[in-house]
């Protein structure tokens, strides 16, 4: 018998015995003596008999993802004001990762990375609105093939036709649905707009039950009496949940909290879980919220949950961006420090916190469904976000496609594996969201597909090690490449060559001083630049030669600094 087969049978035995012991709680010593005998016979039967794959019981998988939530917006990560009680309870039950980074930015690249376990240049979704190749197996495909019921609830962002609510974004050469299709090019990624794509509306990549935020949500709003609102606001759906105004003002959703898209998605995920409470077949469900992504318009009263007096601007708020890439200063929709006052920033932050607290309430109803249907101890739970938000750091809001700051790339990650995670445990090891898929599959006893770039984090969860990666890497919109070790972060701004960045995260956790061109740090910057290029070669990036050529060029505004 192979090691994989033995592992699968042990996993199966674990979950069957867990069920038996739960049924017998409170029935006395005689019951447990009988169970011990039955368990021994069952163990011998499972290990020695012919494989019975179809009958094997595996744990459920619940994958919860928010959109654009930094670690500063989860209380378990040290924010003593924000209220996220349900995520805090999950952290108390599981393992909280404090150095967890996305491997690709923004939304679509990050989502394809974590669901496929591959770096962006190996799954092809290097920008938003690129169709995720159906031939590349992801969590839904693998779990469905393993006999799981599968469901997806919420933001997908991998089916093309992403911006159907923004018709002004439609390329002039297409009508109706469209997505970006890769064009063969020897110099760099190139895409052209072509008709097609399922958008958020149809089952994809092995997820059988499917509830999206456009067609399904809009049909729901019609049903509960908001048809007139949709007619007046045709962009309603997905992220655009009827905001009362622009983000520079105090805004909120015009929908009541019980009909907000976050509540709608949580209701459907909860129903999926409750309907499967009595079934023996395992399930895998992804609950993917559209918030707290902008527009930051939580439903009332969550927009006023926190007062302005409770808000303190980030320590790195006042940043002139001197000595940093000029593209950061030019991104006026994000770098608003020259135009916003402190009150506007504080209001943005309090609305953001309120939105996160509201979503936490929706997460709570789903976790409660697990407990009430007696599935908590049979379900692996992963909570994370696809990337963060600047929430006032460096004088910015939203997200920026020209930087590698911690606020965007370091994300909350909480993992609960029944019978394995030590309650309330913490890991400071460097991990990447490319590692999520192999972690979940190994914990479930499901074979990992070929072609995976990630590696399982379970040795950290088991307490077998405190180390995972020496250095982590990320692709930023096919514009920049980021690497970070335990102390330093380097950003190679190779596309439209701009200043590189180097930050000492130990001495300068706010990333205010760019050291890339400070004479005593230039050798370190050059070494980390080589590490980025070596990583590209090792992981077979198709344009490593071109990136190497661009990286060798003198960047814009270059000036050696002897400080």
Image (cartoon, rainbow, N blue to C red):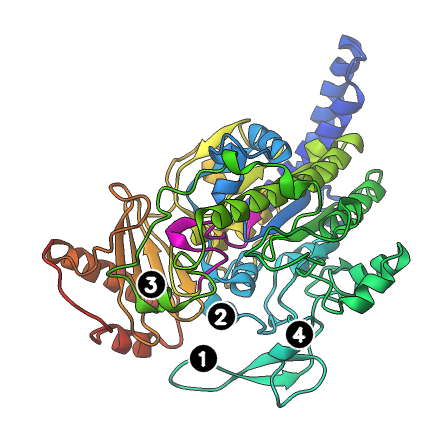
Name of the residue lying farthest toward the top: 29
**Residue 229 position by quadrant:** bottom right
Q: Which residues are magenta?
A: 383-400
At label 4, counting other C-alpha atoms closer than 10 Å, the crowd grade (few under 14, some 14-19, many 20 or more) is many
Q: Pointer 2 and pointer 1: residues touching (CB < 8 Å)?
A: yes
**Of discs 3 and 1, which sits in the foreground?**
1
Q: Position of residue 171 (x, y in %)?
A: 60, 84
CA separation, marks 4 and 3? 32 Å
Mark 1 — residue? 189
CA separation, marks 2 and 3? 17 Å
Mark 3 and mark 1 lie on one chain; the one further toward the N terminus is: 1
Residue drawn 15% across the image and 59% down it: 522
Mark 4 and mark 3 lie on one chain; the one further toward the N terminus is: 4
Residue 393 image label: none
Q: Position of residue 109 (x, y in %)?
A: 52, 64
Residue drawn 39% across the image and 40% down it: 429
Mark 4 — residue? 161
Asked if 159 appears above or below 308 in the picture, the reply is below
Mark 3 — residue? 535
Q: Position of residue 119 (x, y in %)?
A: 46, 63
Mark 2 — residue? 126
């Amino acid at each position: 018998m192979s090691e994989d087969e033995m592992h699968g049978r042990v996993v199966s035995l674990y979950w069957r015995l867990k069920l038996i012991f739960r049924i017998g709680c409170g029935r006395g010593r005689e019951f447990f003596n009988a169970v011990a005998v039955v368990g021994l016979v069952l163990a011998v039967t499972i290990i020695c008999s012919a494989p019975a794959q179809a009958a094997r019981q595996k744990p459920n998988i619940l994958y919860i993802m928010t959109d654009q939530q930094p670690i500063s917006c989860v209380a378990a990560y040290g924010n003593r004001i924000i209220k996220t009680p349900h995520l805090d309870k999950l952290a108390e039950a599981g393992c909280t990762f404090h150095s967890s980074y996305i491997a690709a930015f923004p939304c679509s690249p990050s989502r394809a990375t974590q669901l496929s376990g591959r770096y962006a240049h190996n799954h092809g979704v290097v920008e938003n609105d690129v169709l995720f190749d159906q031939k590349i197996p992801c969590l839904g495909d693998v779990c469905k093939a393993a006999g799981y019921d599968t469901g997806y609830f919420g933001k997908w962002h991998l089916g093309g036709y992403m911006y159907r609510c923004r018709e002004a974004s439609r390329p002039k050469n297409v009508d109706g649905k469209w997505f970006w299709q890769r064009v063969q090019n020897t110099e760099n990624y190139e895409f052209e707009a072509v008709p097609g794509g399922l958008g958020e509306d149809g089952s994809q990549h092995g997820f059988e039950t499917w509830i999206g935020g456009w067609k399904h949500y809009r049909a729901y709003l019609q049903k509960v009496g908001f048809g007139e609102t949709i007619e007046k606001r045709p962009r309603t759906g997905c992220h655009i949940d009827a905001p009362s105004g622009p983000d520079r003002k105090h805004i909120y959703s015009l929908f009541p909290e019980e009909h907000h898209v976050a509540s709608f998605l949580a209701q459907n995920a909860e129903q999926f879980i409750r309907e499967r409470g009595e079934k023996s077949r395992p399930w895998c469900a992804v609950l993917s919220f559209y918030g707290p992504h902008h527009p930051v318009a939580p439903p009332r009263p969550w927009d006023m949950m926190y007062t302005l007096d409770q808000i303190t601007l980030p320590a790195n708020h006042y940043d002139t961006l001197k000595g940093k890439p000029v593209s950061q200063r030019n991104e006026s929709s994000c770098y608003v420090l020259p135009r916003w006052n402190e009150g506007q920033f504080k209001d943005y932050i309090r609305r953001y916190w309120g939105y996160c607290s509201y979503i936490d309430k929706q997460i709570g109803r789903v976790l409660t469904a697990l407990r009430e249907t007696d599935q908590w101890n049979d379900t692996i739970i992963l909570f994370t976000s696809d990337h963060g938000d600047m929430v006032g750091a460096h004088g910015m809001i939203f997200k920026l496609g020209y930087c590698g700051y911690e606020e965007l790339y370091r994300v909350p990650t909480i993992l609960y594996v029944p019978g394995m995670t030590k309650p309330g445990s913490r890991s400071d090891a460097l991990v990447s969201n490319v590692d999520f898929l192999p972690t979940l599959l190994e914990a479930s006893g499901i074979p990992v597909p070929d072609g995976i770039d990630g590696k399982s984090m379970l040795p950290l969860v088991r307490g077998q090690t405190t180390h995972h990666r020496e250095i982590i890497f990320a692709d930023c919109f096919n514009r920049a490449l980021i690497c970070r070790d335990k102390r330093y972060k380097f950003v190679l701004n190779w596309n439209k060559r701009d200043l590189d960045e180097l930050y000492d995260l130990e001495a300068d956790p706010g990333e205010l001083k760019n050291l890339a061109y400070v004479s005593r740090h230039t050798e370190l910057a050059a070494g980390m630049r080589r590490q980025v290029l070596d990583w590209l070669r090792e992981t077979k990036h198709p344009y490593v030669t071109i990136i190497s050529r661009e990286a060798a060029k003198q960047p814009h505004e270059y000036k050696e600094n002897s400080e």
